[in-house]
Image (spheres, grey):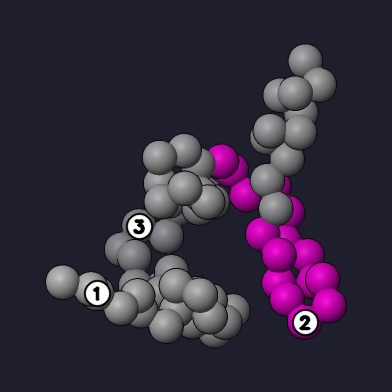
Amino acid sequence: MDQKEPAWVFKGKTIRNLIEELQSFDNQELEVRISVDAGDSHHAISMLRKQREYCVLTSFVDFYEKKK
């Protein structure tokens, strides 16, 4: 059975979508982390920045760990 991925998997979410989703959490003090491997590993979000037409969430954890 071939399941089609939800549109947001490849399209992504807007800042508004993320804010609405984050506001649904009861505990607003939870740390937000970023993962690119379905949650197997995750890192702290170090910075948000605007890059062309995107809002980029960046983690510098790997960068600084490799410098050690």
The residue sitting at 53% across, 80% down in the picture is 11
Q: Assess disc 2: are there few (<14), some (14-19) or many (≥20) residues with their C-alpha within 10 Å of its C-alpha.
A: few
Secondary structure beneath label 1: loop
Give amino acid for label 1.
Gln
Q: Which residue is mark 3?
A: 27
Residue for badge 1 = 3
Is residue 23 rendered to the left or right of residue 63? left
Q: Secondary structure at mark 3?
A: loop
Task: Name which residue type carries label 3.
Answer: Asn
54 sits to left or right of 38 = right
Question: Is label 2 or label 3 in front?
Answer: 2
Q: From the viewer's perspective, is the residue at label 1 or at label 3 nearer?
A: 1
- Could you tell me which residue is drawn at 52 percent across and 51 percent down? 36
Q: Is residue 46 above or below residue 53?
A: above
Residue 35: horizontal and vertical position, in percent?
A: 51, 49
- Report crowding for label 3: few under 14, some 14 to 19, many 20 or more residues within 10 A (C-alpha): few
Q: Residue 46: where, in percent of width, then height? A: 69, 47
> From mark 1 to mark 2, how far is it between C-alphas?
30 Å
